[in-house]
Image: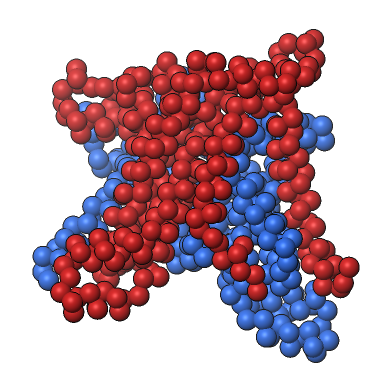
Chain colours: A red, B blue
C-alpha cells in the first residue's frame, strides 16, 4: 500500500467507524430481523427464524395495503404540487427586483423550521372550533365548521397541505439553482428571433431545466416516502387509519407493539421503494463527483 | 413592460404571504390572551401578553428542552463537521474507485427510512447503557448527518485550487500540516456552510430523539413540542410560545446566511 492510500484511509476511518456502527450495522440488522419472528410483548416466543413469512404477511395484511396506497397518494400528490409550486417560486425568485435577497430568505423559513413546529402550526390552523382555515371558508357560520383532522375524507388532504407548505421552498431552491445555470445569451438570441415569453419558457427554460426538475422531484419523492413527523403530530395515523403512512405503520408495529420482525419487514419494503427511486436518480443525474474523478 | 412588473410585484407578494402568513399567525398567537385565541372572528393583533412564555418556561420546562437542543446540536455539528472534513479531503485529494464507492454508499444510506435504522440503534445504545444520554444521541446524530456533510464538503473541496497545497507539501509540510495550515483556512467558508446545514438538520430531528430520549430531562425541543401534554384542551398558547422559541434561532440563521445556505444546498444537490 503506498503512502497516499494510507493517508487517505487514515482520513476516512473516523467517518467510516460512525457510519458502520450506527448506519450500516443497523441496516443489516433490520434486513436480518425481517426474517425472524420476534415480539417484545411475548418474550417467551424468543427469536424464531421464519423465512419469508413476514413478507407474506405484509402483502396479505389489509392495513399494510391500505397504508401503501395512502403513502402512494401522499407521495404523488404532494411531490407534484411541490414541484409545480417550486417552479413558480423559482421563476419569480430568479427575476431581478429590489429586495430579492430578503424574499429568498423568507422563502427559506418554512424549510428551516422544525417539522414538528409546522405540524403543530397546521394542526392549530385546522382546529375545528377556532382555526383560521374554518374562518376563511365559513366566517361566522360556526355550524358549518369542519374538523379536517378528525374527518377520514379530509385528513390526508390536510397533511398534504402542511407538507406542501413546508417543503415547496426546498424544491424552489433546487430549481432556482438550475435556472441560474442557464446563460442569458440564449434568451437574447430567442428574443432577436422574435420568440414570445411563453415560447421561451416552453422551448428553452423547460428543456434546459429538466435535470433540476427531475432532481427536485426525486428528492421530494424519497423524502415524502419517509414522512413521519407530520403524521405523528397531526393525526397519529388516524382517523380510521386515513393517514397511516408506511413509515408510521412501521414505527407503530416496531415500537408500540414490539413486533420487531414484522416492523423490520415494513421498513425493508420502504427501503426497496426508495432504492428503486434513488438508483433511477443516480442513473439520470450522473453526478459529477461520482462520474468524473480528478 | 409595466404589465410585467405589476405581475412580478403581485407574484412576489403572493409568495411572501404564502410562506409567512401561517407562521406569523402562530407567532402572534403566542402573545394573545386565552380568550383571544378562541375568538371568532379571529383577532389578529395580540394583547402582547408574555404569560404563555412564562408558563411554557415554568410549567413545561421549555428552558430545559432548549438547553438540551443547544448542547446536542452544537456537539453534533462540531464533531460531525470535523470528521466529514477529513473524509471529504481524502475523497477529493486521493480519488480512487474506493472513494467513489464510499460516496455512493453514503448516498444510499441517506435515503434509508429512519424506521429501519432506529430500532437497531436503540438496541446498541441500550446495550451500551447510552439511552437518555447526550453522548448516546450525539453518536447517533453524527452518523445520521455524516453522509450529507461529506457530500457538501466534498463539493466545496473539489472547487478549491490544489496548487497552494502542493506548494506547501513541496516545502516540507506533512499532509496533516497542509490540511491544518493551508486547506482549512481556504475551506473555512465551505465548512461554515456545512456546519449551518448540519445544525439545522440536527436541531429539527424528531424520530431518533423520540425513541432514544424517553426521559424528559434529556429531551430536545421537537420532542417537547410534539408531546405537549393535553388531550382535549390543547394548550395552544404555550405550544405557540415554545414553537416560536424553537424556530427563532433558525429564522435568524436563514436571514443572516441566506446566500450560504442556498449555495450549500444547491452545491450538494445540483453539482454533487
Task: Tell me where residue B169 sits by quadrant.
Answer: bottom right
Image height of A155 relative to A115, above or below? above
Residue A110 in sight in this render: no
Residue A29 in sight in this render: yes
Q: Is residue A52 left or right of residue B15?
A: right
Task: Tell me where residue B182 sits by quadrant.
Answer: bottom right
Q: Nearer the viewer, residue A97 or B62?
A: A97
Q: Horizontal and vertical percent for residue A239?
A: 41, 18
Q: Residue at x 82, y 68 (%)?
A: A5
Q: Give the farthest residue toward the left.
A: B2
Q: Horizontal and vertical percent for residue B175?
A: 80, 76
Q: Quadrant of the C terminus of chain A?
A: bottom right
Image height of B60 relative to B71, above or below? above
Image height of A197 relative to A140, above or below? below
Q: Horizontal and vertical percent for residue B5?
A: 16, 66
Q: Is residue A171 left or right of residue B192?
A: left
Q: Quadrant of the N terminus of chain A?
A: bottom right
Q: Horizontal and vertical percent for residue A76?
A: 39, 37
Q: Residue at x 83, y 86 (%)?
A: B172
Q: Nearer the viewer, residue B84 or B232?
A: B84
Q: Is residue B132 left or right of residue A200?
A: right
Q: How many marks?
A: 0
Image height of B183 relative to B56, above or below? below
Q: Residue at x 77, y 44 (%)?
A: A21
Task: Tell me where residue B241 sits by quadrant.
Answer: top left
Q: Is residue B160 left or right of residue A135?
A: right
Q: Residue at x 76, y 79 (%)?
A: B178
Q: Give the farthest residue toward the right.
A: A1
Q: Nearer the viewer, residue A79 or B139?
A: A79
Amino acid at each position: 500500500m503506498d503512502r497516499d492510500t494510507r493517508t487517505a484511509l487514515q482520513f476516512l476511518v473516523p467517518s467510516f467507524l460512525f457510519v458502520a456502527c450506527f448506519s450500516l450495522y443497523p441496516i443489516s440488522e433490520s434486513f436480518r430481523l425481517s426474517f425472524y419472528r420476534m415480539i417484545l410483548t411475548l418474550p417467551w416466543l424468543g427469536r424464531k427464524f421464519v423465512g419469508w413469512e413476514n413478507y407474506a404477511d405484509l402483502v396479505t395484511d389489509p392495513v399494510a395495503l391500505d397504508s401503501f396506497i395512502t403513502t402512494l397518494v401522499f407521495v404523488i400528490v404532494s411531490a407534484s404540487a411541490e414541484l409545480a409550486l417550486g417552479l413558480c417560486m423559482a421563476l419569480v425568485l430568479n427575476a431581478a427586483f429590489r429586495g430579492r435577497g430578503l424574499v429568498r430568505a423568507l422563502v427559506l423559513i418554512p424549510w428551516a423550521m422544525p417539522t414538528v413546529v409546522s405540524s403543530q402550526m397546521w394542526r392549530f390552523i385546522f382546529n375545528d372550533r377556532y382555526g383560521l382555515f374554518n374562518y376563511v371558508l365559513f366566517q361566522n357560520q360556526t355550524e358549518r365548521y369542519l374538523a379536517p383532522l378528525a374527518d377520514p375524507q379530509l385528513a390526508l388532504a390536510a397533511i398534504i397541505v402542511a407538507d406542501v407548505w413546508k417543503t415547496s421552498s426546498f424544491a424552489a431552491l433546487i430549481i432556482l439553482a438550475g435556472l441560474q445555470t442557464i446563460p442569458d445569451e440564449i434568451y437574447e438570441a430567442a428574443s432577436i428571433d422574435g420568440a414570445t415569453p411563453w415560447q421561451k419558457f416552453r422551448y428553452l427554460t423547460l428543456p434546459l431545466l429538466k435535470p433540476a426538475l427531475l432532481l427536485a422531484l426525486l428528492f421530494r419523492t424519497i423524502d415524502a416516502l419517509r414522512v413521519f413527523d407530520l403524521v405523528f403530530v397531526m393525526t397519529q395515523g388516524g382517523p380510521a387509519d386515513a393517514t397511516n403512512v408506511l413509515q408510521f405503520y412501521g414505527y407503530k408495529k416496531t415500537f408500540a407493539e414490539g413486533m420487531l420482525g414484522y416492523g423490520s419487514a415494513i421498513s425493508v419494503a420502504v427501503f426497496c421503494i426508495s432504492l428503486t427511486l434513488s438508483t433511477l436518480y443516480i442513473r439520470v443525474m450522473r453526478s459529477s463527483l461520482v462520474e468524473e474523478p480528478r | 413592460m409595466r404589465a410585467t412588473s405589476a405581475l412580478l410585484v403581485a407574484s412576489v407578494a403572493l409568495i411572501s404571504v404564502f410562506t409567512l402568513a401561517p407562521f406569523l399567525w402562530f407567532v402572534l398567537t403566542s402573545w394573545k390572551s386565552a380568550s383571544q385565541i378562541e375568538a371568532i372572528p379571529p383577532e389578529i393583533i395580540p394583547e402582547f401578553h408574555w404569560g404563555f412564555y412564562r408558563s411554557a418556561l415554568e410549567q413545561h420546562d421549555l428552558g430545559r428542552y432548549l438547553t438540551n437542543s443547544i448542547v446536542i446540536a452544537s456537539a453534533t455539528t462540531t464533531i460531525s463537521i470535523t470528521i466529514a472534513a477529513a473524509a471529504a479531503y481524502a475523497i477529493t485529494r486521493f480519488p480512487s474507485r474506493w472513494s467513489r464507492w464510499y460516496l455512493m454508499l453514503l448516498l444510499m444510506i441517506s435515503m434509508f427510512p429512519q424506521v429501519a435504522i432506529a430500532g437497531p440503534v436503540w438496541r446498541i445504545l441500550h446495550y451500551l447503557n447510552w439511552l437518555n444520554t447526550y453522548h448516546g444521541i450525539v453518536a447517533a446524530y453524527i452518523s445520521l448527518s455524516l453522509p450529507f456533510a461529506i457530500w457538501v464538503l466534498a463539493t466545496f473541496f473539489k472547487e478549491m485550487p490544489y496548487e497552494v497545497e502542493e506548494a506547501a507539501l513541496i516545502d516540507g509540510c506533512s499532509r496533516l500540516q497542509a490540511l491544518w495550515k493551508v486547506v482549512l483556512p481556504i475551506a473555512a467558508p465551505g465548512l461554515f456552510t456545512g456546519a449551518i446545514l448540519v445544525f439545522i438538520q440536527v436541531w429539527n430531528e424528531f424520530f431518533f430523539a423520540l425513541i432514544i430520549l424517553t426521559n424528559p430531562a434529556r429531551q430536545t425541543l421537537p420532542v417537547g413540542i410534539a408531546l405537549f401534554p393535553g388531550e382535549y384542551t390543547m394548550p395552544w398558547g404555550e405550544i405557540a410560545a415554545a414553537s416560536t422559541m424553537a424556530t427563532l434561532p433558525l429564522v435568524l440563521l436563514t436571514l443572516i446566511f441566506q446566500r450560504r445556505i442556498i449555495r450549500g444546498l444547491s452545491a450538494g444537490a445540483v453539482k454533487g
